[in-house]
Structure formats: C-alpha cells, structure tokens
Image: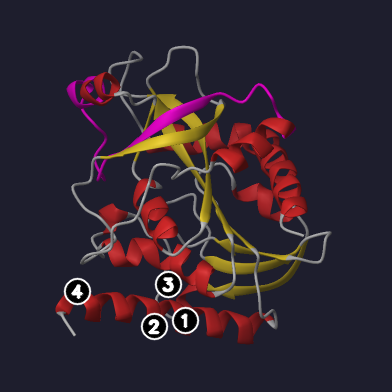
Amino acid sequence: MTQNEADSHTASTDAAHAAAFIAERTGISTHEIALTLGSGWGEAAGLIGTTIAEVPATEVPGFSISGVAGHAGTISSIELPSGHHALILGARTHFYEGKGAAAVAHGVRTAAAAGAKVALLTNGCGSTVPEWGPGTAVLIKDHLNLTACSPLEGANFVDLTDAYAQRLRNLAHEVDPALPEGVYAQFPGPHYETPAEVRMARTLGADLIGMSTALETIAARGVGLEVLGISLVTNHAAGFAPGTLDHSEVLAAGREAGPRISQLLAQIVSRIDKEIL
C-alpha cells in the first residue's frame, strides 16, 4: 500500500468510526441529509424538524469545536417530518485553523459514512457584485479553489463538472425562483483578502469570496454526495465597498438575516427531502 493509499484508507476509517459513534449516541442508524451551517445559518436547525439528540463535537472522533465565533460546537440529529433524519454538523473545521485538509473534509466524509446522500453547505461571505449586499442569499453554481490544496490524495480523479448539483439548485429555485446564482472563491484565510486579490478573483469569475466550502465540496463529491451550496452575503469584499472589514460586522449581518435565511433553508431541505423518499 502506498502512502497516499494509506492516507485515503485512514480518512475512510476515521469517518466510519465517527459515523458509528454518532449512530450509537443518537440512536439513529442512517441520516439521509447533512447540513453544515455557517455564519448566519444556525437557526435553520430548529426549523427543519425535531431534535432527537445533540452531541458535543469534542466527544465525536475526529471533530473539535470550531475555532471561529458564530459556529456551534455540536453534532445534532434531527427527525424531519417525512421520518428521515438530518445530520447537523455544527463543528466546521476551517482550513485556516492549520489542521490540514483532511480535518476540513472529515465532516462531509462522516456524513457519507452515516448514510447521507445530500450535503447542504452554507457560509457567510463577501460579495463582488454591487447588487448583492449584506443579507443576500446566493446559490453557489461553481467555485474557485484558491487554497492551493485539495482534500483528495493519490490517483483520485473526481469529476467536478457538476460539483454543485444542478438538480438540487433547480429544487431550491422551486422554493424561491428569485435566488441568484454565483461563483464562490475560497481563499485560505484567516486574513481577509486585499483589494488586489479580490479584483483578481473577480477577474477570474468570482462573485463571492470566503474561507470555506470549496474544499468540503471536493471531499463530498469524492465520497459520492450531491452538494447544494448556499452563501449569505455578509459584506462587500475588500475594495468593493468603502471602509475596512471586521468579523463582528459579519456576525451582525448574519444575526440580522438569520430568521429569513433559516426559514428559506428549512423550506429547501423539505423540498429536497421529498425527492429522496
């Protein structure tokens, strides 16, 4: 076995161990949908169904409490009205925490091992589109991975042509036909981007700028999950609005938009759930 094969095997085994632990602690053997709730999206967990169990992330193998304010530190099982179950990953590991791409990917890999078919990835981000100000929800249609890293190792050639599933975006548009779609660029962080870097990303086609999601999407596609990505614009990116950037403003924008976007996400989850009955 090569080192890359060994690393891949280890990642798969770690995810399986975490999924088995979650099944034991929650009493739920299969979770059909997984949600990673980024800044501003946390209220959705209480709207999609009934919470069956909530486990501190530090108790689940491979998980830890997120290193950024605005993220929960729990893994939750929620029963949907259909009887299916959603796994809420409230302990996202960001690439800038320095734990490596495997730690970033662990959440979605665990979700797949727990039986999920669909991963909903949300985030708070900056916008390069003047019309998309704070509070705008945007479907991700594609991404630019500007981290210079991948969660995949070895000869693992995953097709990303439909990384953000058109089928799922169509279902989201049934809930809200006015939802815009955009290209998301993930920078490594944790520093905010310079205006020149944002202009570069905009030239390359980026509408949205953030520090998460792309690596998770690559890993999710690598384990066969369909992905729906939704961003909440919390600010205009550097150089596209006057003034400087402050994380407290990101959190404030998330709090203000929280009830509205959480209701939107709950409706989208319900619509997707009907398709996997």
Relative image position of residue 264 (x, y in whole percent): 70, 37
Residue found at x 53% / y 59%: 72
Determine the secondary structure under disc 2. Answer: helix
Residue 13 is marked as: 2
Name the one closer to the observer, 37 or 13. Answer: 13
* Residue type, numbered disc 2: Thr
Give me the C-alpha separation between circle 2 and circle 1. Answer: 5 Å
Tell me the crowding category of disc 3: few under 14, some 14 to 19, or many 20 or more residues within 10 angstroms, Cα based.
many
Relative image position of residue 193 (x, y in whole percent): 24, 32
Task: Tell me which segment is drawn in magenta.
Answer: 175-199
| Residue picked out by circle 4 | 4
Give me the C-alpha separation between circle 3 and circle 4. Answer: 22 Å
Name the one closer to the observer, 257 or 14. Answer: 14
* Residue type, numbered disc 1: Ala
Magenta region includes residue 151: no
| Residue picked out by circle 3 | 63
